[in-house]
Image: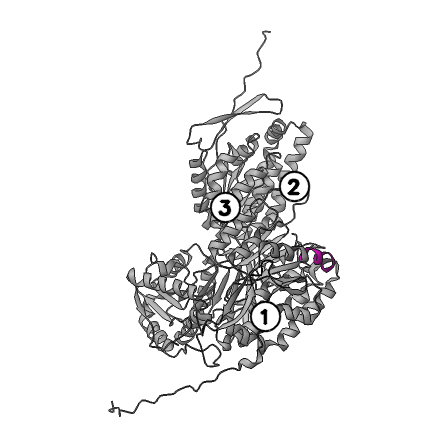
Amino acid sequence: MAPTTPTKPMTFAYAPAPESRSVVDIAPSYGLFINGEFTEAADGKVFKTISPSSEEVLSEVAQATAEDVDRAVKSARKAFESWSALPGSERAKYLFRIARVIQERSRELAVLESLDNGKPIRESRDADLPLVAAHFFYYAGWADKLAHAGYGPDPRPLGVAGQVIPWNFPLLMLAWKIAPALAAGNTVVLKPAETTPLSALFFADICRQAGLPKGVVNIITGDGATGAELVGHPGIDKVAFTGSTEVGKAIARTVAGTSKKVTLELGGKAANIVFDDAPIDQAVEGIVNGIFFNQGHVCCAGSRLLVQESVQDELLDALKRRMRTLRVGDPLDKNTDVGAINSAEQLARIRTLAEAGEAEGAERWAPDCELPGSGFWFAPTLFTGVTQAHRIAREEIFGPVLSVLTFRTPEEAVAKANNTPYGLSAGIWTEKGSRILWMASRLRAGVVWSNTFNKFDPTSPFGGYKESGYGREGGRHGLEAYLDV
Amino acid sequence: MSDRSERLSVLKTYKLFVGGKFPRSESGRVYEVTDAKDRWLANAPQASRKDARDAVVAARKAFGGWSGATAYNRGQILYRVAEMLEGRREQFVREVADAEGLSKSKAGAQVDAAVDRWVWYAGWSDKVAQIAGSANPVAGPYFNLSSPEPTGVVAVLAPQDSSFLGLVSVIAPAIVTGNTTVVVGSEDRPLPALSLGEVLATSDLPGGVVNVLSGRTAEIAAPLASHQDVNAFDLTGAAPELAAELEAAAAENLKRVVRPQAVDWTADPGTRRMLSFLETKTVWHPMGV
């Protein structure tokens, strides 16, 4: 072997590449969007929404009261009569219009989403917004084809849908809720999350531009109490919720004994399973995408890495190498991979669970990375030596924290993967096709990504088994949630 | 010629059907079952909370094998149930007539319809995935397929009125897709349900796929509703107030719930009940060389 010549290490630095904020004009305050108009809350109360990357106040929004919820539901009820009576082909055209306006304004909305949510602009621009537009475009086409959807010759809408969405994909979750509801002929009252209300309020303006009849879409802002008012309102026919399993269970209790139809998209603790024959580099990309996409604020995040013992060292070396290259910081910088944690509250929860991981004996590792001084940040983190009993292997962290467990046989991988009350998603990495199908058929999860992870599409049904909720969003299956079948 | 008294018939002790076996209630309790005219028919087992939990264990144990069986196999077994039932038609006509106060001909129509229902659902086993699944044209180089899978262990409160046709109409759609069940028969009319256990036991149906309990609906339903290893609950046989309580308890582990509603058991059942106890699994794989 020839002696190696020591060379001076080269440092590649990224110059800042910020996306311009000037494409978004955020008003100092927003009211509730009810019956086609912005109005103040009945008691005039407001709350602030901040940018989690800087803690800068972006705007003030109204805190809806029970009276406001009632007003919104009545507005939706009134609009239901004419909206549901419209020919499907007319409803379709409204939805196509909305899809087009979203495409036209996607740059503005992407910047807005990154500001209010903290997610990297690369993701809001390349994942969230294209999927939002695609979702409206997809369901638009169903509006006049419902008789062919497999739910009978003349499926009817349910009425007024009360929809409560989370903060991790604010506009995308809005699209998942509103597009199928409207296509099927329902009207909606939607409550965005307390920490990310802005894109839903901008969506109200999109409804205006599309000429959507007033009252078909109503947006009310507020906290959990507002959501509970909406879910419990006797005037709604349908509850659609995406969020935590805990709140999902409370909703299921609330609607017990009523005739309200419910769909719930809740938490997850997905296993991402890597076999010894997997292409390691591809698997590493999938693992990184699986847990660090959107700061791990993803219900289907691959938060449990199950790696076959024989390739554990090789895989973890490659994974750590890759994690060292992740750029954490300004969400509006086009080179940023991992943005801000959405709120101080969520950051505290992630910290608590990470500390529990250490306290219970797992080994914590994170790359050296400088975190900004203001805002809410958490470095991409890896735990090894995790057992199935550890909290970090059982509880949804909803942050950039990966728990690594090992297995020897496919049977063991299945048993460990299924050893959770959740059942939203799973990942399989192997070159052996028959093993993929064998594994896929045994994993109790609603979405199985094989040799890929965190892929979404409006045509592809999404939703969980067990305590990850019930009902599906996306595809033909997603219509069922909004039809009287 | 001497008068010969009529032969004294041999009565049957009705028992529960759990895990393919016929136990009495572990509680040792029975309750009196009468016909529509209040005449004594039998002492039926009055199942306890423990019986309910044992039945869930049996159903869970059977789930892997039954859900993993081929659809063709499940279809043949459901068809076999129809064959076995046809052969015991007279017994069920008598039991349904007694239970529901029907004439022999009306009871016969119920039993015939029940046999035909098994045949109808038998045919669904290898078709339901084709109507409930989908190939999804995602915008990218991926193979993407959605298929239905059974939810797991389904607790079923059979209808209180229709002791046999209604019973069959709630069991068959749950098991044809691979679920396993704990079924609580009609409280006042449990005998056709208990006798169905005897048919199922001789139809190649693996033990534990259908478990049949009799007793007080509210007493047995409560532990099923709160049981963490039950995945779905068909509340058909629950009165409104009880149904609301059970649905709230079922929320604890997010059971899939079918609420009670008025059903014409003689009508075309459609696919709703089958689809209520299915999960949709979507599998992605990249395409490439």
Give the chain of mark 2.
Answer: B
**Taking A7 as reference, is B198 above or below it?**
above
The answer to whether residue A96 is visible is no
The stretch of residues the image draws in magenta is A76-83
Name the main secondary structure of what is drawn in magenta.
helix
Please give left or right for residue B74 compared with residue A136 in the image. Answer: left
Residue position for label 2: B263
Give the chain of mark 3.
Answer: B
**Taking B162 as reference, is A115 above or below it?**
below
Image x and y of residue A362, in percent: 30, 63
Viewer-side residue, B50 vs A375: A375
Viewer-side residue, A99 vs B177: A99
The quadrant of the rendering that contains the N terminus of chain B is top right
Give the chain of mark 1.
Answer: A
Q: Do the residues bearing badges 2 and 3 touch, measured as CB atoms within 8 Å?
A: no
Residue position for label 1: A132
Image x and y of residue A477, in percent: 60, 59
